[in-house]
Amino acid sequence: MIQVENLVNGQHIFLEESFDDISPLDSTIIAKVPRTKKIDEAVMAATEAQLQWGSLSIIERCYWLDNIANALEDKIEEIAELESLDTGKPYDIARNVDAERSINNFRFFAKFGREIRDDEFVMEDAINHIIRKPIGVVGLISPWNLPLYLLTWKIAPALLMGNTIIAKPSEITPLTAHLFGQICTDIGLPKGVINILHGYGSEVGQEIVSHPDIKAISFTGGTSTGRIVAATAAPLFKKLSLELGGKNASIILDDADLDITVPGVLRASFLNSGQICLCGSRILVHSSIAEEFLTRYLSELKDFEIGPVISEEHRNKILSYIQLAKDEGGAIIAGGNIPDKAGSWIEPTVIGGISHNSRTATEEIFGPVVTIHTFDTDDEAIEIANCTEYGLAGSVWSKERGFEIAERIDSGMVWVNTWLHRDLRVPFGGVKNSGVGREGGMWSVNFFSEVVNICVKEH
Ligand code: NDP
């Protein structure tokens, strides 16, 4: 049994009041997690540590990011094992996606930081110098689907820009954040620079968002939680980054190359059991190729490896959507059942014959469930793609017209003939109810700093 500990001011602390962490693989208790309610001590430690951390040069902080990356690399197998245990995802995905990317987040921002140049705008009689200062103490809140990957995507740029951190991982997946805290102590990261607090979102999460000495909140999670976070942080004038839910379309045009489209759309449907905000949970296929596409898609689905979903509770939510689909007149083309074994497993599910305006086809399910819709014209495809409250991502599959269709989709990110092909320099984020702000490269750097202009006039 693992005892998860908070990291506060360089000390690892277990709280008497704790709750269980349950494995989605077989429903056993795998860890005890502290139920944190008070955060003042951590905020004070972070505030004090920030004076020193913020005074380091960016190059010195890049050195620390590389140190963290090296230390994570040394423990890559352990990270993957813990992530797989905690989320139920196959070990290979935990290693090649979650653990690799967590390391790469630090490597990327270390390299990026070394290349940042301050801008200058020259006037006839003056020069404007644009400088970036740390914000101070920042609060980082992350979800359970890609636990260390998404938390480090915030930690790395926050540290780079001279901030100190209060981080809260999801209560459901605390294990890799716990290990990360130990790694930071092992490499001698100055105490108070990173503080990690475990507990319930409505308790410790809410405390972080409302604490007056935490000056910025970077939040990734569901749209309804994002609304609460925004309502709490706005009156305090905190900087706020919100990466929220999605209901993304995979659009397959009549000139798509099905040899790459079928495996690509399948991966977009079910990677991480459909529990990635970018997953393509609505498949829009041109009617002239719909039959051939579906036959090949269902055939390849048989060999697609997925793990359980994150919890019993989440599976119940997904099952309620499968029932809703039936009530809304949909047909279950594949899956829809619970395999006969312990843990929160559910078959990958494909639903057809349902309106694109139905609740099933417009609300985020965040599991291995896709709906399939056909269209006859590009305009119709665009209308279906844009008919939800979300606007996070999407993909278009076409030999010739991918870019022109992609431009017309109301979402922050669109891939053409690929999906989840990531370059960490580019803006990442959503429009409509999928979020506010962007992460990645310069967008993260700007979020985690105060940009100041100093105008010096010649005399
Ligand atoms: P939640 O919104 O439930 O939780 C996200 C985080 O917020 C968790 O750490 C949670 O803690 C915490 N939290 C909950 N309530 C509060 C509160 N009142 N104040 C502060 N923090 C709080 O999302 P899930 O964890 O269920 O993650 C799934 C969602 O995340 C999906 O909607 C998905 O689309 C979205 N997501 C978006 C991404 C993007 O980049 N746009 C990427 C990945 C996921 P606790 O777990 O303890 O409740």
Image: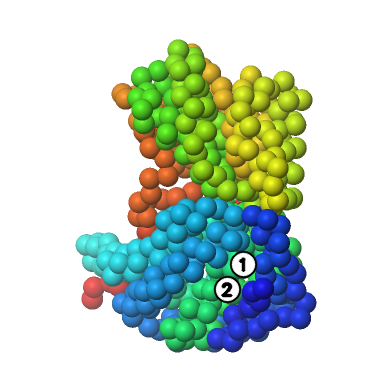
SS type, badge 2? helix
Residue 9 lies, with reference to residue 387, above or below; the image says: below
Kind of element beneath mark 1: loop
**Residue 229 relative to residue 296: left or right:** right
Is residue 152 in view? no
Is 103 drawn above or below residue 89 in the view shown? below
Crowding at dot 1, Cα within 10 Å, few <14 / some 14-19 / many 20+, comes out as many
Q: Which mark is residue 178?
A: 2
Q: Nearer the viewer, residue 88 or 413?
A: 88
Measured as percent of width and height from the top left, residue 378 is found at 44, 19
298 and 224: which is toward the camera: 298
Residue 149 placed where, x, y %?
A: 49, 60
Image location (x, y in percent) of residue 372? 57, 25
Amino acid type, label 2: His
Residue that appears at 41% across and 21% down: 253
**Residue at left offset 37%, top offset 34%:** 416
Residue 399: name its quadrant. top left
Dot 2 crowding, Cα within 10 Å, few <14, some 14–19, many 20+? many
Instruction: Report how far apart the C-alphas of labels 1 and 2 lie in the structure.
Output: 6 Å
Of 458 and 218, which appears nearest the observer? 218
Q: Residue at x 40, y 65 (%)?
A: 103
Q: Are marks 1 and 2 in contact (CB under 8 Å)?
A: yes
Label disc, if present, on residue 174 of the rendered structure = 1
Residue 41 in percent (x, y) is at 65, 84
Q: Is residue 33 left or right of residue 394?
A: right
